[in-house]
Image (cartoon, rainbow, N blue to C red):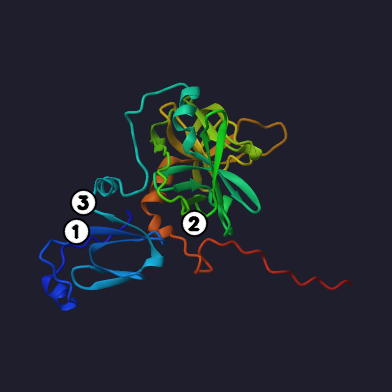
Amino acid sequence: MRTRTVFRRVLPGLALALGIWSTRALAVSTVYLKSGAEVKGEIVSTKPGHLIVDLGFTVLTIPRDEIDRVVDVDAPAAAAREDTPDLYNVNPEQPALSVKENVERCGSAVVQVRTPVGLGSGFIIDPQGYVVTNEHVVAGENRIVVVLYRRGRTEQETVQYAKVRIAALDSRFDLALLKIEDAGDTVFPTVSLGDSSALNEGQTVFAIGSPLGLERTVSQGIVSRKNRALEGQLFIQTTAQINPGNSGGPLFNLRGEVVGVNDMKAMAVGVEGLGFTIPSAALKSFLRNRDAYAFDPRNPNAGYRYLEPPRVPKPKN
């Protein structure tokens, strides 16, 4: 369980000592940091370069360039985040629809993730632009582009966001959390997460992604095995086609819920219909504990992959 420190009301003596006394009650706010951490307290002073937050027993100065956003806990959006502080939402009341209807319902939240060396897929889980994909799609990259597809008046339109930050990485489960940072006030379409443990073998599922760069490709299949052990991890085995470029994209059930993150396929001549997906249960755990996987580009060991050093050639006999 991700730990958070919750702080209560400002101490009057502390506020007086700072010379920021007011006759009104100060509102409790949550300050979300770019590192993925968060601080809850009362903002007692705002400056051009920093905020001063009262934690009850001390005050904290937070530079503005380290702040992702500030949310008033009393606001409706903040209240919703307090109910679901894990960035994702669940909606078990969604009705089951056909694959075609589901593509119309949730396809706009599926994105393409591009880097200088390749591309993959992803999906938006939070209206403020948090995107899930595979770790192997973005690890070691500092230039990431997220491409959204939306219906235009006459044809499909694309929107590109080139300022994308890696918020968290988990190489063990091959999961990554990205944050779109150049979207302004855009409210993004999202998908909800389902319960992978409730899947049944033979159940219909479908994937949306960009195999080989062919955006918005839909493939349908069934759950072949809900718990397939591979490389020390459990995967959903599915007949839905998963190819290079599908990595990081969603596997949906017929309620339009993401039940897994597409990860890999069996690569052998003549072998098809053996795709493997990270269960949504593992994704939820990653998101709930994202502070433990927070990515910091200033830390050389935080998510970057390094090539092996050149080997000294052996002398010839």
For residue 27, what is the image quadrant?
Answer: bottom left
For residue 37, what is the image quadrant?
Answer: bottom left
Q: Are marks 3 and 1 in contact (CB under 8 Å)?
A: yes
| Label 2 element class | strand
N-term-proximal mark, 3 vs 1: 1
Rate crowding at label 2 as few (under 14), some (14 to 19) or many (20 or more) other CA atoms within 10 Å.
many
Front-lying residue, 83 or 67:
67
Relative to 261, is 70 on the left or the right? Answer: left
Q: Is residue 201 visible?
A: no
Residue named by callout 2: 166
In the image, residue 68 above or below residue 277? below
Rate crowding at label 3 as few (under 14), some (14 to 19) or many (20 or more) other CA atoms within 10 Å.
few
Query: Which three-letter amino acid code belongs to the residue tagged 1?
Result: Ala
Query: Which three-letter amino acid code belongs to the residue tagged 2?
Result: Ile
Q: Residue 247 location, x and y as percent?
A: 57, 43
In the image, residue 161 above or below residue 223? below
Q: Is residue 75 visible?
A: yes
Residue named by callout 3: 74
| Residue 27 tag number | 1
| Label 3 element class | loop
What's the CA distance linking mark 1 and mark 2?
31 Å
